[in-house]
Image: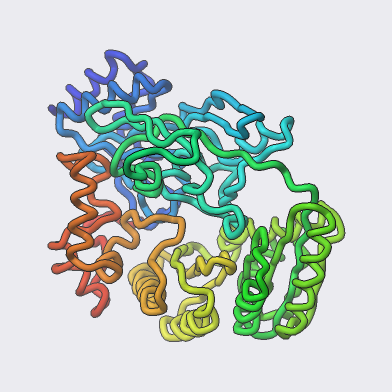
Amino acid sequence: MNSFELVSKLRTFLPPEMVLHETEDVRPYECDGLSAYRQAPMIVALPQTEDEVVAILRICHAARTPVVARGAGTGLSGGALPHAEGVLLSLAKLKRILEIDPAARTARVQPGVRNLAISEAAIPYGLYYAPDPSSQIACSIGGNVAENSGGVHCLKYGLTVHNILELRVVTIAGEILEIGGESMDSPGYDLLALMTGSEGMLGIVTEVTVKLMPRPETAQVVMAAFDDIRKAGDAVGNVIGAGIIPAGMEMMDSLTTHAVEGFIHAGYNLKAAAILLCESDGAAEEVAEEIRRINEIMERSGAIEIRTSRDEAERLGFWAGRKAAFPAAGRISPDYYCMDGTIPRKSLSRVLSGIEALSAEYGLRCMNVFHAGDGNLHPLILYDANRPGELELTEKFGAKILEMCIQAGGTITGEHGVGIEKINQMCSQFKAKELEMFHAVKAAFDPEGLLNPGKAVPTLRRCAEHGAMHVHRGAEKFAELPRF
């Protein structure tokens, strides 16, 4: 079926303006937040109901046309990069909050609902949705499910997978599945966990039931400044080792705090080599005791300055700087390449030292900002895409960081997904038999491989031809994709 026939079929049930195919109309969808790689889709479909999603998928399945789902477009691994001969299925118009049940502490929402909008809707009930990615003002819950997103408070409250109860999912064949439920457990395989983080490769989410949490009575943040980033890394282990699980624990290096302070004016110590934010929340007495202990640990760990938020405005101000780290990078560099790897906490100091050495080796600045409590690193490599060869150099730098994470006993992603960005590093992370099992799972849901093809899980041939070469010799990734 050619594009003209496919457009005609889609317009039998979608308004003409909801089926885009002209070059100038589809161009805005050519990339997600990872904008180094771009590809315009053949067609963009913008359904407004689940029935329309079903109809679109049935048509594409019959025509053997690839489908790539897209949420708010804030992803950072190229997971929503369109297929040149496929349909880009935008779920942005499915944005209704269907139900909030304060007694059950749940919310049932469509995939296009913004992360922050769930908490805003739950305010009258004294509830909120805990996962809070830095992009929560814009990112959608459907995208959060696809990538298993976290946020600054995931150390205590968990990732997306720990905060959802039920999904409605449409397969490529147009069948509706109801996965999970409101009970504590259900018989059979844990398909809810399987679907969460599957990057749109197994099915299209059309409805999500999330858990809501009671808003804590109070919360305070300790902001500790260190003259050595290794001391800050050790302080993280000291807090966890003392049996304290903070609501959030985030770290920023000097380059990051300078970029953020000029943007947000959060009050960070600009003489420090690293800033550590550590939050406690809960009942007032419990928070007071935990904050006292955290202050003692920071002092013993060598902090040169320790400040505790005095009120809610100051607490939010401390966090505002951390949440603005990514946009702040744009103030000091034309482009940045955001990595996402996870390591054991005990390896923080060693890996941070390794990143510092790589920065000197490649001659590229790197802002280190990350979820310190669970070892989820987000190095931001600063580069200029207009300088010939600098993107390729940045890719090699990023690949080395991910290899270092693997060598430290960690993984190549914590919450951004694999997409196309890290697909070659999957060849280092997993053995051939493990990759074969991933492909078997994919085939069980999508035998023709039409949903988000070419993402997340590499073929064994790719690993043999490109992956191993990239890992060991720095071969160029994604040579077939246009760059800007």
Image check: 67 left or right of 114? left
Query: Quick check: 14 above or below 448?
Result: above
Residue found 66% across the figure and 40% down from its top: 128
Q: Nearer the viewer, residue 136 or 445?
A: 445
Place of residue 447 in the rendered image (x, y in percent of width and height, measured from the top left)? 16, 40
Q: Nearer the viewer, residue 255 or 375?
A: 375
Q: Would you say residue 371 is visible in this rendering?
A: yes
Q: How many marks?
A: 0
Residue 275, image quadrant: bottom right
Image check: 403 left or right of 356? left
Query: Quick check: 59 above or below 112?
Result: above
Image check: 84 left or right of 315? left
Residue found 37% across the figure and 30% down from its top: 178
Image quadrant for the N terminus?
A: top left
Image quadrant for the C terminus?
A: bottom left
Residue found 18% across the figure and 44% down from its top: 443
Task: Pick out the residue farthest to the right.
Answer: 310
Q: According to the image, what is the colour scheme of the structure?
A: rainbow
Q: Nearer the viewer, residue 62 or 366?
A: 62
Residue 252, image quadrant: bottom right
Place of residue 229 in the rendered image (x, y in percent of width and height, measured from the top left)? 62, 81
Q: Would you say residue 25 is visible in this rendering?
A: no
Residue found 47% across the figure and 63% down from its top: 338
Place of residue 421 in the rendered image (x, y in percent of width and height, measured from the top left)? 34, 60
Place of residue 388 in the rendered image (x, y in percent of width and height, measured from the top left)? 35, 70
Query: Quick check: 93 above or below 414?
Result: above
Query: Quick check: 107 above or below 271?
Result: above
Task: Pick out the residue farthest to the top.
Answer: 12
